[in-house]
Image (tube, rainbow, N blue to C red):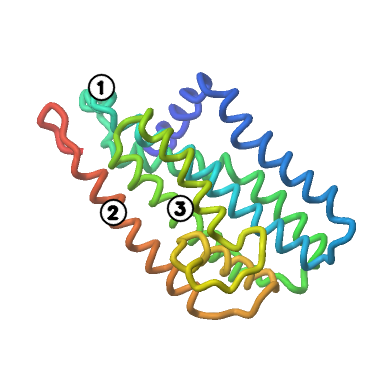
């Protein structure tokens, strides 16, 4: 059931292909290109630090923002009424959206990793930890997007939120600068960022970011399940 829903989401995105091309490909790769072109006076560690920040910023701006908008569209009353007449449960539709945009955001993540491998070298990369870090980042940000989108249930209101929220999450995180301010730890983006950087050898491995990121993932997942499961339309629970 999930595979046909992913195909349906991909077909439905043809209406937004220009928006998706700019948001998922053009802008992220343009930013990465500018970083690399301006890297002449920086050390390999500095470049890897910036590129790791770029990866997480891309997940926040592209993945979280786009998924929030799409989920909010699904939970608009008129769209919910349509889905109430179709066989798939709305939870499976949302899961298909999560998987679809996870796949679409992978190119910028993988290209960023290739750049990091070039400057850092394979020997400094802890592959199992890096895999776990990205898994946590995708689930944490994805469930946050689902929770927000399902709660708003209006694509126009969601667009306003996704214009401001990614900016706040990026600015108040050590994505592009070094900082030890304690207030940054209130930002949910800070912890998966620390996990990724510890896995690629840019900082020491500490259990605290992993624990906090895991706890946030559980909390956001619970919120997403609650918000998705609390909608009714035509007496059909979703």
Residue 141 image position (x, y, % from top left)? 45, 53
Q: Is residue 119 rendered to the left or right of residue 15?
A: right
Residue holding disc 1: 78
Residue shown at the point (18%, 43%) measured from the top left: 230
What residue occupies the far top of the structure in this picture?
Answer: 15
Residue shown at the point (50%, 28%) measured from the top left: 10
Q: Is residue 81 rendered to the left or right of residue 205?
A: left
Q: Secondary structure at mark 1?
A: helix
Distance from the alpha carbon under mark 1 to that under mark 3: 27 Å
Residue holding disc 3: 141
Q: Earlier in the sequence, mark 1 or mark 3?
A: 1
Front residue of this view, candidates 93 and 200: 200
Q: 69 above or below 79?
A: below
Residue 89 image position (x, y, % from top left)? 26, 36
Distance from the alpha carbon under mark 2 to that under mark 1: 23 Å
Residue holding disc 2: 223
**Count of number-bearing discs:** 3
Q: Are marks 1 and 3 in contact (CB under 8 Å)?
A: no
Q: Earlier in the sequence, mark 2 or mark 3?
A: 3
Distance from the alpha carbon under mark 2 to that under mark 3: 12 Å
Q: 37 above or below 127?
A: above
């Amino acid at each position: 059931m999930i595979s046909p829903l992913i195909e349906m989401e991909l077909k439905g995105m043809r209406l937004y292909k220009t928006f998706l091309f700019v948001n998922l490909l053009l802008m992220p790769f343009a930013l990465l290109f500018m970083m690399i072109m301006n890297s002449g006076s920086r050390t390999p560690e500095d470049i890897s630090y910036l590129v790791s920040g770029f990866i997480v910023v891309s997940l926040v701006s592209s993945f979280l923002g786009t998924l929030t908008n799409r989920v909010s569209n699904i939970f608009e009353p008129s769209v919910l009424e349509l889905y109430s007449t179709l066989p798939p449960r709305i939870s499976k539709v949302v899961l298909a959206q999560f998987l679809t945009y996870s796949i679409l955001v992978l190119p910028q993540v993988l290209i960023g990793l290739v750049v990091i491998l070039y400057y850092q070298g394979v020997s400094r990369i802890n592959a199992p930890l890096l895999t776990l870090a990205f898994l946590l980042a995708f689930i944490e940000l994805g469930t946050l997007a689902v929770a927000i989108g399902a709660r708003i249930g209006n694509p126009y209101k969601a667009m306003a939120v996704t214009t401001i929220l990614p900016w706040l999450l990026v600015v108040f995180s050590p994505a592009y600068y070094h900082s030890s301010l304690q207030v940054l730890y209130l930002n949910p983006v800070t912890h998966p960022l620390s996990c990724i950087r510890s896995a690629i050898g840019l900082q020491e491995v500490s259990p605290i970011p992993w624990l906090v990121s895991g706890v946030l993932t559980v909390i956001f997942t619970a919120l997403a399940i609650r918000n998705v499961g609390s909608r009714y339309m035509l007496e059909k629970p979703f």
